[in-house]
Image (tube, rainbow, N blue to C red):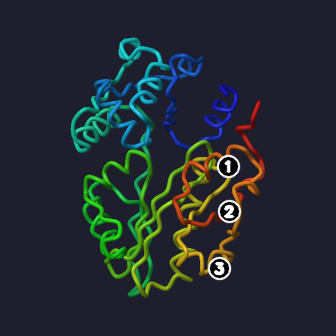
Amino acid sequence: MSHAVDLLVRRARQAVVVIEAIKLLESDLSAGCDTVWVVEAPEDQQISRLMHKRDLTEAAARQRIAAQSPQSLKLQAAKVVIHNSGSFEGTWEQVQNAWSKIPRPEEPLLRAPVTARPGQLVVRRGRPQDAEEIARFITRVTHGRKRMTRADVMAAFGEKAYLLIARDGQLAGVAGWQVENLVTRVDELYFEPGLPLDEAIPALMETVETASAELQSEASLLFLAPYLARHVGAWRAVGYKPQTVQGLGVRAWQEAALESMPRGASLWFKRLREDRVLRPL
């Protein structure tokens, strides 16, 4: 695994590379890190979160925590400690503050954004300050079947990113996605009624795949609600096809699908690169 991580780091074009690993300190990966960050929360809060987010029993949650090294040892090894027992905003501020102190080469100034034409779709990355707008949009376009609050979206930012589609300055689409273990997963898609999907889908997926390439993702999995899966031509036009979990063939991709697929969704697949980095031993 350390060889695979080393290969990924050497391929990366970014000035800073982050390794997120539960057992970082128990492996030889930590020796290659310039700094170690540890996220700290009381054990009872860890148990509560595992039960709520992972749907574990209390006994299973305690067993998972017990399988890790003592938190006290991690705190001793940490150069940065993020206290995660308060609000999402408080945790985010700590991360932003610590991140700003990392020395890195001066980056070129970003180009000024191109002025969008009337009716043109613009895709950009969502930010924590967009949480309220994202929550209102999802609640509205689902007619309240999925009620979201700002706190819900802030919590989701801990696991995934959001891409926003705007048209004439108004939010017209939201996609929730993540890359984990070199597999892209798009598990939330919401569009304004009447939005031309033959335009929105290519614009959205181009952004997803560009960002996925930066993260060296091997494959992309879409989980489509039935009303979105009916747009077969639009998805096939950007290279996706319906697939079964079994048909994915690669264990890591199958595990990602089983872990992320929402109930009632269909699985669509696209291979993003031919060479694989993480192979089963």
The answer to whether 33 is drawn above or below residue 5 in the figure is above
The residue that appears at 35% across and 37% down in the rendered structure is: 49
- Amino acid on which the number 2 mark rests in the picture: Phe
Q: Quadrant of residue 99?
A: top left
Quadrant location of the C terminus in the rendered image: top right
Q: Residues within 10 Å of mark 1 (few under 14, many from 20)?
A: many
Quadrant location of the N terminus in the rendered image: top right
The residue that appears at 56% across and 83% down in the rendered structure is: 198
Looking at the rendered structure, which numbered label has been put on residue 253?
A: 1
> What is the x, y in percent for residue 210?
58, 59
First along the sequence among labels 3 and 2: 3
Looking at the rendered structure, which numbered label has been put on residue 231?
A: none
- Amino acid on which the number 3 mark rests in the picture: Val
Toward the viewer: 43 or 102? Answer: 43
The residue that appears at 39% across and 68% down in the rendered structure is: 113
Distance (Cα) linking label 2 and label 1:
10 Å
Q: Is residue 87 left or right of residue 8?
A: left
Distance (Cα) linking label 1 and label 3:
22 Å
Q: Secondary structure at mark 2?
A: strand
- Amino acid on which the number 1 mark rests in the picture: Trp
Distance (Cα) linking label 3 and label 2:
13 Å
Q: Secondary structure at mark 3?
A: helix
Looking at the rendered structure, which numbered label has been put on residue 232?
A: 3
Location of mark 2 (residue): 269
The answer to whether 214 is drawn above or below residue 171 in the figure is above
Q: Residues within 10 Å of mark 2 (few under 14, many from 20)?
A: many
Toward the viewer: 200 or 225? Answer: 225
Q: Is residue 264 left or right of residue 153?
A: right
> What is the x, y in percent for residue 48?
32, 34
Q: Is residue 147 left or right of residue 105?
A: left
> What is the x, y in percent for residue 17?
51, 36
Q: Are the two marked residues, 2 and 1, in contact with CB atoms closer than 8 angstroms?
A: yes
